Image (cartoon, rainbow, N blue to C red):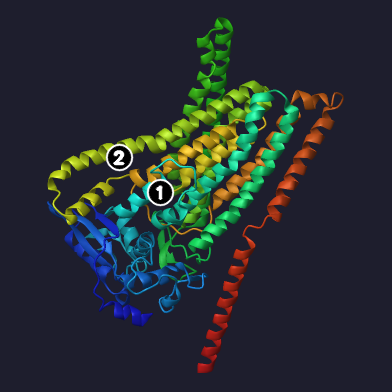
Amino acid sequence: LMESWSFLDTVESNFRPLVVIELAKGTKEETIEWFTKRIVDKKANGGAQLLIKPLVTENGVENIYLVGASHLRLLLGAETVGLVKECSDNSMRTFTYSSRKTFKDFADDNHNFLTMAECQYIIKHELENLRAKNEKMIPGYPQAKLYPGKSIVRRLLTSGILVQIFPLHDSEELKKLRHSWYGRVKVGYQPLDDIRCYFGETIALYFGFLEYFTFALIPMAVIGIPYYVFAWEDYDKYVMFATFNLLWSTVILEVWKRICSILTYRWGTLLMKRQFEEPRPGFHGVLGINPVTGREEPVYSSFKRQLRIYLVSLPFVCLCLYFSLYVMMIYFDLEQWALDYHKENESNFSSLMLYVPSIIYAVVIEIMNRIYRYAAEFLTSWENHRLESSYQNHLILKVLVFNFLNCFASLFYIAFVLFDMKLLRQSLATLLITSQILNQFAESLLPYWLQKRYNRRMKKQMCSQKTGRDLSLAEQVHMEKEMGTYLGTFDDYLELFLQFGYVSLFSCVYPLAAVFAVLNNITEIYSDALKMCRVYKRPFAEPTANIGVWQLAFETMSVISVVTNCILIGMSPQVDALFPDSKMDLVLTVALVEHLLLAIKFIMAFVIPDKPRDIQMKLAKLEFESLEALKQQVRAFQMQL
């Protein structure tokens, strides 16, 4: 590998811009010179050994730089990040430069062996791993302190010197993807492999899950329609419907694990080794020694962090939950007022007024969810978590708890305190449909309209200057840098999680919930695709092997739904009539059925393997081969001794 790095010095390459770096206006010359030198310096000297070029426009050189790399440099980078590619014998293996000839479609002159998203991921990895050597500060900025091993890019970001780093769109590839993805209305699967090649595995996996979840809801929707049409108040038939839904929700979540492993094996991320996590950019503390790596880095007392979590964050979350319940009680007062108004007037207008409190409450829920999200992000950041994974887990927990209570508390109250099934159906339908319309508008339609207005304005400004390719590249960079930044799949999964709650928690009361969910998800696929291709900057690809903590969140929701549906059926007049003498027998019977259903759920989860047999065999074979290779290396080393 060292020979390859030294050979890299002699290779001349055509510059292909992949990543854009925007520095703050007025950044000092010595800072720019030092930073660009570190980017192009040899690996042996602590540089990234990449290519960098300033973006030249009509106004001269701005503080925008284009970063690229030679083909050889990208191949060596692919080995560094541990990319997994398909071999000529159709097996998946970790890419190494020395064994490059054994990989499918590899040729020294084939510059498409690595996808553009993979190239951009490699460049991001190399830039983030530019580390301070003996510098005590960023040249020109004495307040921006450095220490040996500190990521330079992260310090530049937190100091406000570096505004943003983002990968460039590929206009031609994007046009092809848009056409095959949402350019025409069709019944069929999404081009997941193309999405993965362009946006990376995390986003492709989200769209794969969205598509799978939509298809999985179709049986629930199809069975729900006749229940809605023919047997509105007949709870005997709902026992079968609810039981099917509960078992079906277990099956679809278990089968998703298998589909997920098939996709991620094909994409190579199932085999990727988890890299050692670096401290997140916002993490701060006094300088100390990391006991694992032995490197100097900020250290923050975990006791202080626990104090912040339990003495500040936890009481704040509880206060927000109390406020949510207070707003819910105001909603019930409004509901009572609408009911009284209808009784007095008995008109078409008063009938419509019955739905107004639920619609207002649905809008208020969405507003509260969004405000709370900002507060949760601020608090979780203030808790000062060292790792990004720890930060994400604490944020997801805060947001899920609040969203669950905020969205579903009123439904639980109507079902188990007021015992009003008619109001429960009406509230569930109104909350589900209103939240879907608001989400579609806020997440896709509004950003798309604003972006389109901005693009039109930019084109008017720059059309008179259009003279050649470089200028069109400058125009592209200027348009993309002003686009919104895609903040990840968190909100998208959260929306699906809440939708799953509406569908499964009270499925025996409102069978049409699955129908509305399917209709929403079909439009969601198109609107989210539009959002990714037209509204936001291209995000960096992020390799992932599964949907992470969201799998556990969905499974937890399906367990809660067993309990709620069993209690709802137990409360129905028909079931109640079966136990006229003893209510204790009714409670025990409901508890027994609920435990039985939970037992069946857990048995099914255990029986259905997470990975298909052929993938299990391939993984076992690779593990055996790597152990054999390690033994041979040890033997060769012992022979030398």
Q: Which residue is mark 1?
A: 180
Give the residue type that dot 2 points to: Gln
Please tell me which residue is depicted at 48% across the width and 61% down the height of the picture: 267
Answer whether residue 365 is visible to the viewer in this image: no
Answer whether residue 276 is visible to the viewer in this image: yes
For marks 1 and 2, give the CA distance: 22 Å
Q: Nearer the viewer, residue 113 or 587?
A: 113
Q: Position of residue 458 (x, y in %)?
A: 21, 42
Asked if residue 620 lies left or right of residue 574, the reply is left
Q: In the orientation shown, which residue stands out farthest toward the top?
A: 344
Label 2 Cα crowd, 10 Å radius (few <14 / some 14-19 / many 20+): many
Q: Which residue is mark 2?
A: 451
Callouts 1 and 2 close, C-beta under 8 Å = no
Asked if residue 428 lies left or right of residue 246, the reply is left
Q: Position of residue 94 (x, y in %)?
A: 48, 71
* In this rendering, the label closer to the viewer, 1 or 2: 1
Q: Secondary structure at mark 2?
A: helix
Dot 1 or dot 2: first in sequence order is: 1
Q: Nearer the viewer, residue 604 or 334?
A: 604
Asked if residue 362 lies left or right of residue 570, the reply is left
Q: Position of residue 216 (x, y in %)?
A: 59, 43
Please tell me which residue is depicted at 47% across the width and 65% down the height of the picture: 275
In the image, residue 100 sits, relative to residue 387, either above or below, namely below
Please tell me which residue is depicted at 20% across the width and 42% down the height of the picture: 459
